Image (tube, coloured by chain):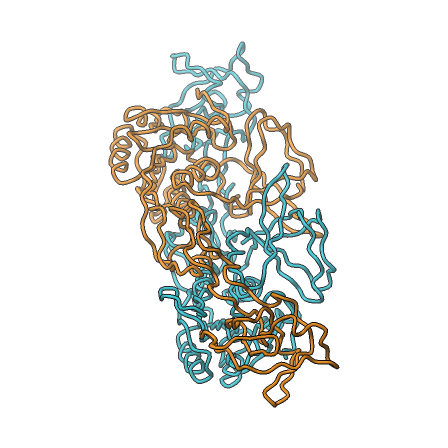
Chain colours: A orange, B cyan
Amino acid sequence: MLTVKTPQQATQIINENISSYEKICEIVSINNLLGRVLFCDICSNEFVPDFDRSTVDGYAVVASSTFGCSDSIPAILDYKGEVEMGQEPDFEIDKSSCAYVPTGGQIPKGANAMVMIEYAEDFGDNTRAMLKPSAPSQHIIFRGDDVKKDQIILTAGTILQTKDIGTLSALGISEVMVCKRPRVGVISTGDELIDITQPLKKSQIRDVNTYVLCSAIESAGCEPVKIGIVKDDFKALQTAVQKSLKDCDVLLVSGGSSVGVKDATAKVFESLGEVYFHGIAIKPGKPTIFGKIGEKSVFGLPGHPLASYFIFDLFIRPMLYKIQNAKEFRNSTVAKLTAPIPSNHGRQECVPVRIFEQNEEFLAEPIFNKSGLISVLAKAQGYIVIDRDCEGLSKDDLVTVTLL
Amino acid sequence: MLTVKTPQQATQIINENISSYEKICEIVSINNLLGRVLFCDICSNEFVPDFDRSTVDGYAVVASSTFGCSDSIPAILDYKGEVEMGQEPDFEIDKSSCAYVPTGGQIPKGANAMVMIEYAEDFGDNTRAMLKPSAPSQHIIFRGDDVKKDQIILTAGTILQTKDIGTLSALGISEVMVCKRPRVGVISTGDELIDITQPLKKSQIRDVNTYVLCSAIESAGCEPVKIGIVKDDFKALQTAVQKSLKDCDVLLVSGGSSVGVKDATAKVFESLGEVYFHGIAIKPGKPTIFGKIGEKSVFGLPGHPLASYFIFDLFIRPMLYKIQNAKEFRNSTVAKLTAPIPSNHGRQECVPVRIFEQNEEFLAEPIFNKSGLISVLAKAQGYIVIDRDCEGLSKDDLVTVTLL
């Protein structure tokens, strides 16, 4: 029998004992940064922009020279010339003058506002008429408005997205120190398993977990190492685990983690290192194992693909981000249940849901299933976690849905 | 002056005129499918599982033989042997017998329920005592419970995620026909621009858009083609556009799309093909151009990185999914505004927001900014779209946030 931990206890034990994965950095080009984890803070060593720039096409003026002007009483200003894009203007503006500046062009010294080209007129005599007043600083981005010098602009642990690529390129940073991706090994055990590329005989089952876990590992910013199927046999599994750990930072073994006659995972972990827990009070996913061999974390996951996926998402994904020092942002949404979910008898439960929008609110429809059905995931957009102390949920209850 | 379209009109014009991108498929290994778009429906040509299997370690029985049994009055059944994982049992079960079946093992003919090993006892005389009754079908997954034969299990246009990898591998599908990734060219124009790898002179600006757009294109499942910076000059841009279109399915030109003296993008598009609109009533992002050259869609985007990013997200990302026939699922959440947002004077407006959780609800804090500030994106987790007819939003209003 398993002595199970609560999910909270399990998380705590994992956090207290995860291997001190040697955080190694590597330098990666800005073209390949999506999903990588920033290794240290990015501090700007310049102002962005580095000069005052116009946000419109129009005329740079001293604001006060336009106060009170209108269509009927324009402010007539001497025309000093045009600022070229990417060029520093070689003239100054005073209360009697103006200069044309295109969007993004540098504001000449002396000027402190822009009048849009729509509100100005060229009288052809080297003057320009301003038909609308402009307030000081109007239509100008000042030096450092975007980023100040010595400002920390991205912090270590940020999982880099498209939006961050913008910040980095604005600072002229084309190569970035990111955390080296941890290598995570995946073993499937079970005498009934065959690889998906092999023909299936009656009573055999395809090895789904290897492919799901490798894909999930990749989506958590790590490098999956596919080891393949190992027979549910102590010696064979022991050899495979020892060999894999030479090449991996973390190892996942799916299947063989319950208490059947032949399930060898826990025994193998114990023979080579330490097992911290065997069993979590969660449905699905109870027969989960966490241990350490040498300095490396090892996990035993349920053989059922759905259970194995949930355990990955709830315990292993956060752990993989943690050893990379990454700040995970879980996409989740609040939705209204379309059907009641009965009590779960003292075990935390994960219920997959379909999400759809109706009358500007999100609805979550629970997908009831027998443990282990992988097709459930194909239909689901997310899942809800029902606490062990919760005595079930009612229709129309608002729930937080973790998006897949 | 621009004659602007509403965002709805713009979307409609784009949808009616997007190039008939020749949907070409390619075959990709299951190891490289994340984010790819399924080319045709996936239909199962077998049952999953293909046999009745146990979901527990225990004894296969005829359910009715256990009815009424208990700790004190166990049901004594002849022991027929053990089912090996991955092997077809060569015996049958009747009302007087049972057999050991491990989790995932095949249920022998005749049996219709499982009794968990915890509720059985071995009396050592080749019989087993069942201490708890089991109902018909208890702890069994039947043939086809997960997937039926000839069932469509994933539909064309699905953007493949980890969860779908599970479904494919359960069906033994290791290679999949996906849509060939459209090649999307990116040109930045502007005499003030320099590449981010170059030293910056006063009055120059780094080319942020190339990197942001290439990254965004990648995240939309397409292949970015970085063309680089082209001077804001009709001839130079015309040559670059013509050359790029030979190698790309779609072309994005950022900068040079407003109506400044030198802005050449619209003129170049007109000289080579047709411009369908020039200007969208949206803030930021007004000077957006959509046209077609030959059979290929071309877009002019604002030079300001923030505006350019929003235009990509609102108009170009959906278009890129559409030409791949992909069903996009936008992650969004409902949140409560922490501050009022004033009226936007007849233009649809995109307001970036920070999201945080407080007392089990999501709060959205608007990030007010001057147009074009890229650092705003670094702080934002999403954005809200305020309709042109909306006269502003109040504190505590519930808004839908599109997550970045």
x, y (%) of residue A39? 38, 46
Q: Residue furthest top?
A: B72
The answer to whether A70 is drawn above or below residue B353 in the figure is below
Quadrant location, the N terminus of chain A: top left
Residue B313 in view here: yes
x, y (%) of residue A131? 69, 78
The answer to whether B127 appears left or right of A145 in the picture is: left
- How many numbered marks, from 0 up? 0
x, y (%) of residue B388? 70, 64
In depth, the one of A333 and A162 nearer the eye is A162
Q: Quadrant of residue A44?
A: bottom left
Residue B317 in view here: no
Q: Quadrant of residue B186?
A: bottom left
The answer to whether B312 appears left or right of A138 in the picture is: left
Residue at horizontal 33 percent and vertical 24 percent from the top: A274
In depth, the one of B202 and A177 nearer the eye is B202
The answer to whether B385 is drawn above or below residue A239 in the figure is below
x, y (%) of residue B329? 56, 55
Q: Residue furthest bottom?
A: A125
Q: Residue furthest front?
A: A95
The answer to whether B330 appears left or right of B193 in the picture is: right
